[in-house]
Image (tube, rainbow, N blue to C red):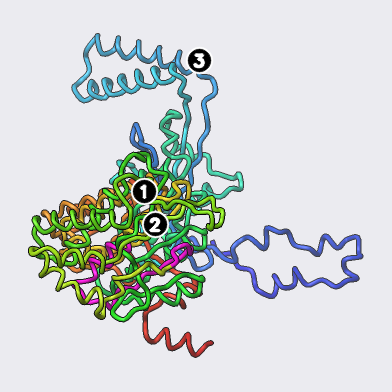
Amino acid sequence: MIRKRKEEEILEAVRFKVNDTIDNNYSKKVRKYTDFIYPSGISTLEPGYIIIDGSYTACLLCCNLPYQVPKTFLDDLINFKEGVEIYLKQRPVNNKAELIRDITQYLGFTKFKMNTGGEDQVDSGLQENALSHSKYIKKRLAEGDDFWFISLFIVVSADSSSNLDVKLKSVEGLLSGKDIFYKRADFRQLEAFLCTLPVGRQNQRMLDQTERNILSSGLCGFYPFTASSLSDPEGMLMGINQHDNGQVIIDIFDTMKYNNANMIILGGSGSGKTFTSQMFTGRFRMQKIPVMMICPLKGYEYRPLCENVGGNYFKICAGSKNTINMFDIRPVKNLENNDVSWLASKIQKLKINFSLMFPDISERELKLISTILKSVYEKKGITLDNASLFRQASESDFVSLTPQLKEMPVLADVQQEMFKSDELKKRAEEMEEFVTGSLSCFNGKTNIDLDNLYNVADISELDNPLIPLAMFMITDIYMDRIKADITQKKVLLLDEIWRLMKNLLSAEFVLEVFKTIRGYGGSAIGATQDIVDFFALEDGLYGKGIINNSQIKIVLRLETNAAKEVGPVLNLSEEEMIKVENFGRGNGLLYAGDNHLAMAFTPFETEHKLITTDRKEILRYRKEV
């Protein structure tokens, strides 16, 4: 049947004159609202589908379902893709007592029939199956379950008959995998389609043919319909779920949902790792969460966003005016183990500094340096007693509620003491460049204000051997700030984290950061494009440890060798491995707890202007200003 309404007739129905509306019979001239929501044409000439305003639509009738269904039974179908809709109709059986009585009678009759014999093997098997099902239903009803009848329809739509056929075969494959017996409503497509409309005019004969019984515990597997996207109430927009185009909003600080707030971002060159990292940190800043970043590669790419949000951008490199004193002791009063000596803890960290400064340093030399460090601090009046860290207030001092720290030693003080040791004299000479040479930014008092909500440390202009040293020093400073207030959310981003994974002591320190930062209300985010070096130390022990201590994992496009390194650690399926090797820029896998999603990490227009590294886009945006 083909029913069409001309455009002129529709226009005539909505074109009224003022004097017509005054007429008492004007209602005769007004068409019903249904005329405007009905389709302009429906074609039922083909047996396998109907055409509704150019849309090719076919219905599948689910005639039988598995006896027991798990939770989220229909998730794969619900989130399949555009053009697949599910209609479920159900009705309860209210008289449970009568139903139990009927089942009891059936059980007695079936047992009697089986005991008397005379049935063939096929009938006997069917009767045993029916008997076990009846016993199960009776037991569940007695335990509080309710009895329902349901009908399930799948409506598939496409823009052409060929696309419809492809989509139907995909849906049928899913149905078969779920052990759902189905059939196409050929020659009855219009009747089936009308059964899915909320107009109260269902074809009872078709409903009877598709109806089956189910317990309420099984019906829960259909309701509520769930989506694979995540939406935490106080979360941050991470991106778009490629499966259902839904927004993925995650609150990484939700301790009820995630064991920790740590994140690891793995991506090859050109995969969008830097872009994605900045998008996240910018959104954390919008939530007024302090962000501390270390950028060992192309640090200038982080500057536009940092300055736009009023952040603190500083460079550590040869000739830089910014100075960080690696010998600063910053007391953390909120530690549970307040009886631990701050000086002793600092000396252990300084040993890591010197091992990064001199990669070939021996254990003997480190022990000698430890002794010298202790004596250097003692000359400043600082001992293992924590109280010695603060100077006594004099009458000339202003009244202050905050205790004043004593003057801290600098690298030059340590060098002078090392010259006095025959075994360390050569090391002292090697330190000259750090004390008076081009790298004197490592020698002096700290002149960087880290109280800003957005801090970016650019160390990308340092020589490669010095980058791990700078990363460790700045991480140590950041961690002291993170520990200062355990009630405040904080984010620490270590870009190109693999640089700290090549030294045993620094790798242990970073792993400890990922293990303990949760206790201080913080989140550690590691990003790396060098996957091989990330897993190189101790057969990947520290790299795997960081991943295992990160509840949020993001895998962008990787080269084949890198994907093979990551695959076993994250238990990537064969399909996920193929995706990882072929993702476009800014697309990747998101692992949030037990949820695995294919994501598009899409920025807003303003974000894109500030964090894009594409030369053509930057030129275009500059012309727009």
Task: Pick out the residue farthest to the front.
Answer: 395
Q: Secondary structure at mark 2?
A: loop
**Could you tell me how far apart the alpha carbons at marks 2 and 3 are, in whole angstroms?**
84 Å
Q: Which residues are magenta?
A: 449-475
Spot occupied by residue 488 in the image (x, y as percentages of width and height): 47, 50
In the picture of the structure, the residue carrying the numbered disc 2 is 406
**Could you tell me how far apart the alpha carbons at marks 2 and 1 are, in whole angstroms?**
8 Å
Spot occupied by residue 424 in the image (x, y as percentages of width and height): 11, 64
Quarter of the N terminus within the rendering: bottom right
- Give the residue type that dot 1 points to: Ser
Q: Is residue 567 visible?
A: no
Q: Are marks 2 and 1 in contact (CB under 8 Å)?
A: yes
The residue mark sitting in front, 3 or 1, is 1
**Point 8% across, 59% down: residue:** 362
In the picture of the structure, the residue carrying the numbered disc 1 is 388
Spot occupied by residue 448 in the image (x, y as percentages of width and height): 41, 68
Q: Quadrant of residue 296?
A: bottom left
Spot occupied by residue 214 in the image (x, y as percentages of width and height): 42, 30
Please say whether residue 544 is one of the residues in the magenta stretch.
no
Q: Secondary structure at mark 1?
A: helix
The residue lying toward the viewer, choosing from 363 and 71, is 363
Q: Is residue 530 visible?
A: yes
Q: Rate crowding at label 3 as few (under 14), some (14 to 19) or many (20 or more) other CA atoms within 10 Å.
A: few
Task: Mark 2 or mark 1: name the one nearer the start of the chain.
Answer: 1
Taking the image as shown, residue 350 lies to the left or right of residue 59, namely left
Task: Mark 2 or mark 3: name the one nearer the start of the chain.
Answer: 3
Q: Are marks 2 and 3 in contact (CB under 8 Å)?
A: no
In the picture of the structure, the residue carrying the numbered disc 3 is 97
**Point 83% across, 60% down: residue:** 27
